[in-house]
Amino acid sequence: MRLQADPRNEAAGQAFRAGDWPRALALAQALVRDHPHEDAPLLLAGLAALRMGQTAPAVDWFEQATRLRPGDAGHRMHLARALVKAGRRGEAVAAADQAIALAPSNPAIASMLGMVYHHAREYAKALAAYRRAVELRPGDANAYFNLGTGLALAGDPEAAADALETCLDLDSRHWQAHLALAEVRTQDAESNHIARLESLLDQAGEDPRADAYLNLALSKEYDDLGDHPRAFQHLLRGKRTASRGRGYSIERDRAMVDALRRAWDASARHGGAGCDSDAPIFVIGLPRSGTTLVERVLGRHAQVTAAGELQEFPEAFKRATGSRTAGSLDEDTLERVPDIDWSALGRDYLAHAVPQAGGRPRFVDKLPHNFLFAGFIARAFPRATILCLHRHPMAVCLGNFRQLFAPGAPGSYYDYSYDLLDTGRYYVLFRQLMAFWHDRLPGRIFDVSYEDLVRDPGTRIRHLLDACRLPWDEACLAPERSDATVATASTLQVRKPINSSGIDAWKRHEAQLAPLRELLEGAGIEIPD
């Protein structure tokens, strides 16, 4: 039977379009078995696996499809997407380069590969791809949005604002662009977008995306203009709308932290020694706590590369357990921790991470939520440096709540951040877990106070370098001179010289944050004034 006549072919497509990824994958696998010379079932299997977070199988399906049709740019594009999600950045870039060469005039492929290059930290190539997409399709609002966000990350806010305004000229209902435009610079009384945003919000009706993005944009702009009570009301409304359908409960994260502690204690009797390398410097902590600043300080050192927010340790950890589930820290994965070979895990991590080190002997892995893995990092790398950032509890909780992390990605590390009090509860869990790691690993984790660092950078940077066993390098005092792209929410702040101007910014919302303060103090967290 030909593939087109096989009833499972249409059923697989219907399941995929309906979002039933497991059924689509199962049907596609059956079609692959019975139609081994057809590339379409392989492509569908890869796409379904990618939607389910199964990156390794997705890579395999796309590689098979590419072997069947080596001249298909779309297949190589999907392969590049899967490879970058799997943390195989060098291979992803090679696949993306091949796809671009095969279809240099395809704007959709250029846009998609711009995102692949971005995630692979090939920012110059990402910008070139975004610009190519705009040239090929000058009426495409989303192409200008991608270009604008790329320019913002590259440190060109004026060009970014121009691209985002063009996006909105083409499509005033590109809601995400309104937030990006609000965030690209500090707004002032003479130049802001409040009137337009308020008008659009009145017209938006029941559109949840409009409500979320427009309210968050208004929150940012009113805050810039000093109307902090109004800014906070828009923040509450925007985050409440953005949280719809996520189904988050803090109990999920409490259970995960409890499981982490049990897994650590169970693993203490197994696994042998770790990897001897001291190349990685892990910078951990809650987002918005100063991790990007520390990364850029260290990245200015002659012996160190700032490698960014690497996913390599969670992925190597997952591989080491042998678990086939989608989550990196689910029950099945943590139950297998006692079986981990820690030295092999360390070598696997280095095989994927070292190519990001740019030839220097040390590199910074700045994935904030690696604090969840801190004990396992210490076991895999007995000689590696682990730096944990701490910031004023109210400041870091507000910073997390204000940020819209990974919109549209349910089940992420950041689901706590859609509710102010959930953010406070998650902060308590962070403090409890770090206390556990310090108890089990005395002296292995070096705590860094953000406030101390920005008030006395000369002294504190010396302490940082000592903790990393690095000699003094004067360049570390000027992280704002780094030409590295900042692919985080800190892009505006870290391009300025180190300063303490933002330390007490949370106090602008002190009255609105009273319930958060009560929650934290009730949990035994001291709130310094």
Image (spheres, rainbow, N blue to C red):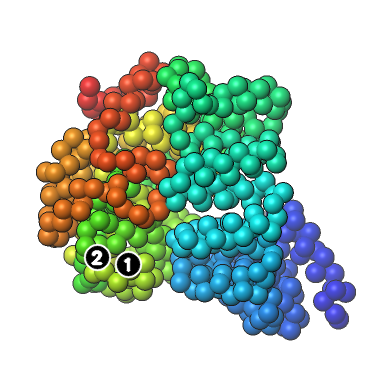
Residue 430 appearing in the image: no
**Residue in the foreground of this view, choosing between 237 and 431:** 237
Name the residue located 59 percent from the left edge and 30 percent from the top edge.
214
The spot of residue 252 in percent (x, y) is: 46, 43
- How far apart marks 2 and 1 lie (CA) works out to 7 Å
Which dot marks residue 362? 2
The spot of residue 218 in percent (x, y) is: 54, 26
Residue 416 appearing in the image: yes
Q: Would you place residue 446 above or below residue 23 in this image? A: above
* Mark 1, other Cα within 10 Å: few <14 / some 14–19 / many ≥20: many
Name the residue located 58 percent from the left edge and 56 percent from the top edge.
130
**Residue in the foreground of this view, choosing between 368 and 34:** 368
Q: Is residue 387 left or right of residue 323?
A: left
Instruction: Say which quadrant the N terminus sits in.
Output: bottom right
Q: Earlier in the sequence, mark 2 or mark 1?
A: 1
* Mark 2, other Cα within 10 Å: few <14 / some 14–19 / many ≥20: many
Which dot marks residue 125? none
Instruction: Say which quadrant the C terminus sits in.
Output: top left
Name the residue located 68 percent from the left edge and 82 percent from the top edge.
68
The reply to whether the C-beta atoms of the residues labelled 2 and 1 are less than 8 Å apart is yes
**Residue in the foreground of this view, choosing between 10 and 384:** 384
Q: Amino acid at mark 1?
A: Ala
Q: Residue furthest right?
A: 5
Q: Amino acid at mark 2?
A: Arg
**Residue in the foreground of this view, choosing between 28 and 178:** 178
Hey, which quadrant is residue 244 in on the image?
top right
The spot of residue 384 in percent (x, y) is: 22, 62
Q: Is residue 81 left or right of residue 280?
A: right
Which dot marks residue 357? 1
